[in-house]
Image: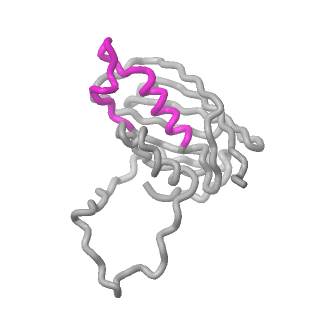
Amino acid sequence: MGQPAHDTTTAESQTPNTSTPAEAAPESPTEATTPSPADAPTEAAPELTGAAAMFANDRASQHLGITVDDHGPGWAQCSMTVTDIMTNGHDITHGGYIFLFADTTFAMACNYPGSITVASGGDIDFLKPTYLGDELVARGHEVIKQGRSGIYDVTVTRGDDIIATYRGRSRTLPARK
């Protein structure tokens, strides 16, 4: 996952990419070649900020296989495949995993570069069950942002079926002193 690919700054002017981008396989450290000093980059890689920085340290979401397909200020799209560890005693996906998935997408949408934004609350409605092996997509967008507070909606789908809707409330923290 890299920096946001879009320069939009308001939810009203955004057009999130809802198609699945072609994914390039990242080069593993064992396959990398050591560049010679002449091949070394002259500039350091840009420091991750906002959603990219937050996700880089989000071990819980990464452990569950959640991927960030794309994001920009005020919106995000993530994917997750239901694994056996995520199913409950009814052989359906435990609601807590669906909530976590939607909440991760919400976090990607509300963490603008340069800000640290956290959830002040969130609610979810489960509409249909999901099962082992289901591929889920969550799309979140900013409804409104006023000052340090915001409201974001996330729709979780399996194919054409909406399986859950989530509403998150955010609070941007003041800069550290």
Q: Is residue 1 left or right of residue 12?
A: left
Quarter occupied by the N terminus: bottom left
- Could you tell me which residue is drawn at 46 percent across and 25 percent down? 162
Q: Position of residue 146 (x, y in %)?
A: 76, 41
Q: Position of residue 20 (x, y in %)?
A: 39, 46
- Above or below residue 98? Residue 33 is below
Task: Find the residue positioned furthest to the left.
Answer: 31
Tell me if residue 84 is in the magenta stretch: yes
Please tell me which residue is depicted at 43% across the width and 47% down the height of the picture: 69
175 drawn magenta:
no
The residues colored magenta run 80-107
Q: Which residue occupies the extreme top position in the image?
A: 90
- Of 177 and 172, nearer the camera is 177
Q: Where is residue 152, by image quadrant?
A: top right
Point 41% across, 79% down: residue: 41
Left or right: 172 in relation to 130: right
In the image, residue 60 lies at what x, y percent? 42, 38
Residue placed at 27% from the left, 62% from the top? 29
Camera-nearest residue between 3 and 175: 175
| Snapshot colouring | one colour
Q: Which image quarter is the C terminus in? A: bottom right
In the image, residue 172 sits, relative to residue 155, either above or below, namely below
Task: Give above or below for 12 relative to 120.
Answer: below
**Is 119 drawn above or below residue 57 in the view shown?**
above
